[in-house]
Image (spheres, rainbow, N blue to C red):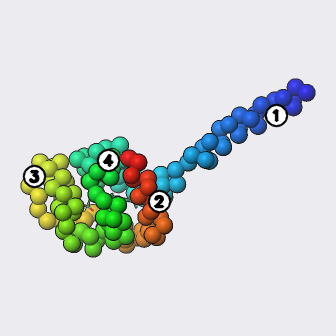
Amino acid sequence: MKLNQRVICSLLFFLGWSVPSLLFADPGKALFKEKHCALCHNVNNPGTVFAPACPGLKGVRHRHSKEWVRKWLKDPSAVWAGNDADVRDINARYFRYRGSRPKPRESFMATIIGKKVVLTDEEIEVLIDYLWKL
Ligand code: HEC
């Protein structure tokens, strides 16, 4: 009886712990790590902080449209070359953080994403859902 109670207790404890974490685990958060985004980006920093060289991603939904982020994650190199208003804004923030005037530079993100790490359309949607909560 005693042993059974203990077994039941630990089973309930295990379920109580694992079921919510399975139900509420964020697939976007896991993908953000798995696809190496977390190596460069700090999600707790605002986009005005480029530490060490990459913008913080807090509030990123206020800086770009979903459509733009979709293109950016697919092919940052092409988007950067287009030098649109969003790209110019990132570049201005980058140099402001360093206390200097904006000038042309290469995209750092494009050295990896779109080359070494290629994301599927589904993965991009999952990442965008995650980014939109930051
Ligand atoms: C090699 C480092 C690196 C990796 C890996 C990386 N990024 Fe970036 N990211 C940057 C840099 C640097 C910028 C600023 C533009 C540039 O120089 O490329 C940027 C810009 C962004 C922006 C725009 C942010 C803003 O404030 O306007 C988003 C969104 C973003 N990255 C998402 C991601 C996601 C999602 C991943 C993973 C799939 C990722 N990044 C992987 C370095 C990286």
The amino acid on which the numbered mark 2 sits, given as a three-letter code, is Val
Residue that lies at the very extreme toward the right in this rendered image:
1
**In the rendered image, the vertical position of residue 86 relative to residue 38, given as above or below:** below
Q: Amino acid at mark 4?
A: Gly
Q: Which mark is residue 80?
A: none
| Callout in the foreground (4, 1) | 4
Label 2 sits on residue: 126
The residue tagged 3 is: 100
Please state which amino acid type lies under the numbered disc 3: Ser
Residue placed at 21% from the left, 63% from the top? 87
Q: Earlier in the sequence, mark 3 or mark 1?
A: 1
Label 4 residue SS = loop
| Of labels 1 and 2, the one closer to you | 2
**Which amino acid lies under the numbered mark 1 shown in the image of this protein?**
Val
Say how many tags the image has.
4
Q: CA separation, marks 4 and 3? A: 24 Å
Q: Earlier in the sequence, mark 2 or mark 3?
A: 3
Res. 6 visible in picture: yes
User: Which badge, 4 or 3, is on the more N-terminal residue?
Assistant: 4
Report if the CB atoms under discs 4 and 3 are less than 8 Å apart. Answer: no
Tell me if mark 4 has few (under 14), some (14-19) or many (20+) residues whose alpha carbon lies within 10 angstroms of its own.
some
Q: Ligand 1 is found in which quarter of the picture? A: bottom left
Q: Indicate which disc, 1 or 2, sits on the residue closer to the N terminus.
A: 1
Write down the quadrant of residue 104 in the picture.
bottom left
Which disc is residue 7 wearing?
A: 1
Q: CA distance from mark 4 to mark 1?
A: 46 Å
Crowding at dot 2, Cα within 10 Å, few <14 / some 14-19 / many 20+, comes out as some
Mark 4 or mark 2: name the one nearer the start of the chain: 4
- Identify the residue shown where x is 26% and y is 49%: 47
Q: In the rendering, at what x and y percent does residue 134 appear?
A: 38, 47
